[in-house]
Image (tube, rainbow, N blue to C red):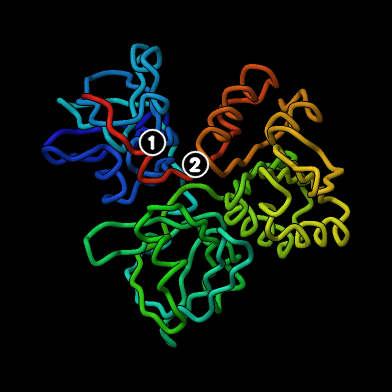
Amino acid sequence: MTTVTLQPSGHIFQVEEGEAVLTAALRQGFILPYGCKNGACGTCKAQIISGSVDYGVYQEKALPPEERTAGKALICQAIPRGDLVIEARTVGTAKDIPIKTLPCRVQKIERVTEDVAILFLKLPANERLQFLAGQYIEFLLKDKTRRSFSMANAPHDDELVQLHVRHVPGGNFTDHVFTKMKERDILRFEGPHGTFFLREDSQKPIVFVASGTGFAPIKSIIEYALNKNLERPMTLYWGGRRPGDLYLNDLPVKWASEHAGFKYIPVVSEALPEDQWTGRSGFVHRAVMEDLPDLSACQVYACGVPIMVDSARRDFFTQCKLPEDEFFADSFTTQADTAQSPK
């Protein structure tokens, strides 16, 4: 058994043989930033101050060679080779929320586009799921695999758990959702998980950047913030290839009409003539950069496909002066995104 010390907090925890740093931390109640837990998103990246690790398997885009050389590691995969000191932020807000395994019933399936369905899940009568807006659950499938989906409902609106599911052709679970799942089906899930949630100890203006169904956890956060009458200015940029990809477009339009401190900018990258699109065009994170070339005084919450999240992280840091500790992200990785890199 080895010891890991977290800086700057000074917290210490034990890691069992063959156990990843993040797994050990979560097991002992230390919540560190993480997302996919499979080495594909980069959210859990930490700086090794002393000691060494087996880096495990991961996507090179999540940990480029130059960052590994500079002493960084993905702690969801990294296994200590001895006592370790790492620099990683602890997230205090999530630590008191219990992680549960619960059954649920499919209450309703709403097909909002050809490739997006909204699932409404009913928990047992005596259960409620406590979570932070922006977190996700993991379905526990019969073949022992898991599938992660962010909750789109806000914590105060917890009668039904709402998930936004995009159909990934060839994906076992989403194929099932779009071809076989029916109302009253029973599923099992574990949650809540994740550190993508609103940091309420700040008064900075908030910029939300979503692509596709990355809107789901951002919807949860925004509805939570509006319900709390949060006074921080909020701007949502939601991007899709075609206008139809903005499958709940009327909802943020409604928020903007009802709340003076909220702005909404929809962005479409591949509109066709028949779409008659007259709004913003191009990549969604580029629209942010055009409008807000100086993000030094902002917090950014980005969610969606990995290429959008990675591009936003890189460009906002290097070109828009965004502080690295003010970027929070949830990268929606699929099975195809988790191809393994060598140790």
Q: Is mark 2 on a helix, strand or loop?
A: strand
Q: In this view, does 6 lie to the left or right of 113?
A: left
**Image location (x, y in percent) of residue 223:** 68, 61
| Mark drawn on residue 40 | 1
Q: Which of 57 and 295 is in front in this view?
A: 57
**Image location (x, y in percent) of residue 255:** 80, 59
Bin the neighbour count of mark 2 within 10 Å (Cα to Cα): few under 14, some 14-19, many 20 and up: many
Q: Nearer the viewer, residue 301 or 31?
A: 301
Look at 74% across and 27% down and name the residue there: 289
Q: Which residue is denoted by mark 2 in the rendering?
A: 331
Q: Quadrant of residue 83?
A: top left
CB-based contact (under 8 Å), mark 2 and mark 1: yes
Look at 65% across and 57% down and name the residue there: 219
Look at 45% across and 78% down and name the residue there: 106
**Image location (x, y in percent) of residue 86:** 33, 26
In this view, 86 is above or below 174: above
Q: In which quarter of the image is the C terminus?
A: top left
Q: Which amino acid does label 2 sit on?
A: Ser
**Image location (x, y in percent) of residue 81:** 15, 25
Q: Which amino acid does label 1 sit on?
A: Ala
In this view, 327 is above or below 191: above
Q: Distance between the residues labelled 2 and 1?
A: 8 Å
Look at 49% across and 57% down and name the residue there: 167
Q: Which of marks 2 and 1 is nearer the N terminus?
A: 1
